[in-house]
Image (cartoon, helix red, strand yellow):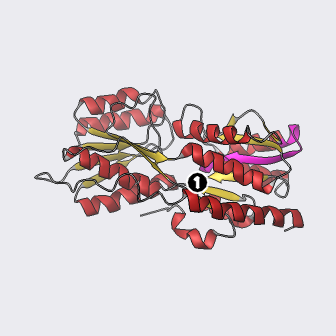
Amino acid sequence: MNRNTSAKMAALSALALALTACGGDDSGDGGGSGGGGGGSEAYEIAFVQGVAGDEFYITMQCGIEEAAEELGVEVTTQGAQQFDPALQTPIVDSVVASAPDGLLIAPTDVTGMYRPIQAAADAGIAVGLVDTTLEDPSMAVTQVASDNEGGGAAAFEAIQAANPEGGTVLVVGHEPGISTSEARIKGFLDALAEDPAFTALETQYAQNDVAEGARIVTSTLQATPDLIGVFGTNLFAAEGAATGLRQAGAQEQVTVVGFDAGPAQVEALEAGTVQALVAQQPAEIGRQGLEQVIASLDGEEPEAEIQTGFTIITQENLADNQDALYRSSC
């Protein structure tokens, strides 16, 4: 590791400690008052993931299942193989036909998923939106998500700490029209706008495809050889950015900050291709989502909106934040 990289890592480590202290422990806020499945029989809850097999949603499922066991309710989980409203809609339609008591869902489009989710609410199913949301979420009894704008701002601060002289940066989003992605981008760009030493290129979207993320980064380096930072807004965008930098041999030049902390992202962090990760709390999102849906079913007043925190992870503090990493199985 050269001297410049060592200085960047030290700056990121100091920033991670500060940001973790102020933003990474919200798990006690907003929602521990859920009911206990107080009806005459166990409630049946359906959880529809944004995409099956994604460590973020697997970790959320684990949190939901652990809470379900404590609350004495039954949960079934399913999800499409791609983050796509055309694939998620028939799953929701099937769930509605099975008439569960509640539905926890991560909508894959802010407008495209409105009709099927509204149909669930119209059928008397208590709906909780977890992670992502809708343009009109009025049918939901609760919305639980990360502080995505705050996480985006923290991602910029990590790049800023590693490159105090400023420079040109790129945001690689996962897909347009997804509430979490747009909030992270907004938080990042709003923070960047306050520092005139930095310039942002036009945001590009990897469409949840690692290969596309790599292509975006390699082509950007060709057009902008002085690029100093990349923010990847989810697992696939960050992994794609790391792959593109490896292909271009630009790991020492570009600071990469990724959202999420799945196994591939942690491997990239350990290898030094990614310098910082913004780890969400998917298990806590799932737990609080379930608690609020159960509270609604029990006739209590659920919390309409809950934001969970995040943890900034670097090589230096990785060993101390193992519980913030995402799981591949429950």
Quarter of image, res 66 = bottom left
- Residue 141 appears left or right of 256: left
SS of the residue at dot 1? Answer: loop
Residues shaded magenta: 221-237
Q: Is residue 268 visible?
A: no
Residue that carries the numbered disc 1 in the rendered image: 260
Q: Is residue 180 visible?
A: yes
Does 4 sit above or below residue 170? below
Query: Tag count in the figure?
Result: 1
Residue 230 among magenta residues: yes
Does 87 sit above or below residue 66? above
Does 75 sit above or below residue 206? below
Instruction: Please name the residue shown 65% across and 46% down the image.
Output: 153
Q: Nearer the viewer, residue 275 or 209?
A: 275
Image quadrant holding the N terminus, namely: bottom right
Quarter of image, res 21 = bottom right
Q: Position of residue 219 (x, y in %)?
A: 81, 39
Mark 1 crowd level (few <14, some 14–19, many ≥20, 10 Å Cα) = many
Does 115 sit above or below residue 312? above
Residue 330 among magenta residues: no
Q: Position of residue 46 (x, y in %)?
A: 31, 46
Image quadrant holding the C terminus, namely: bottom left
Task: Identify the amino acid type marked 1.
Answer: Asp
Q: Position of residue 73 (x, y in %)?
A: 23, 56
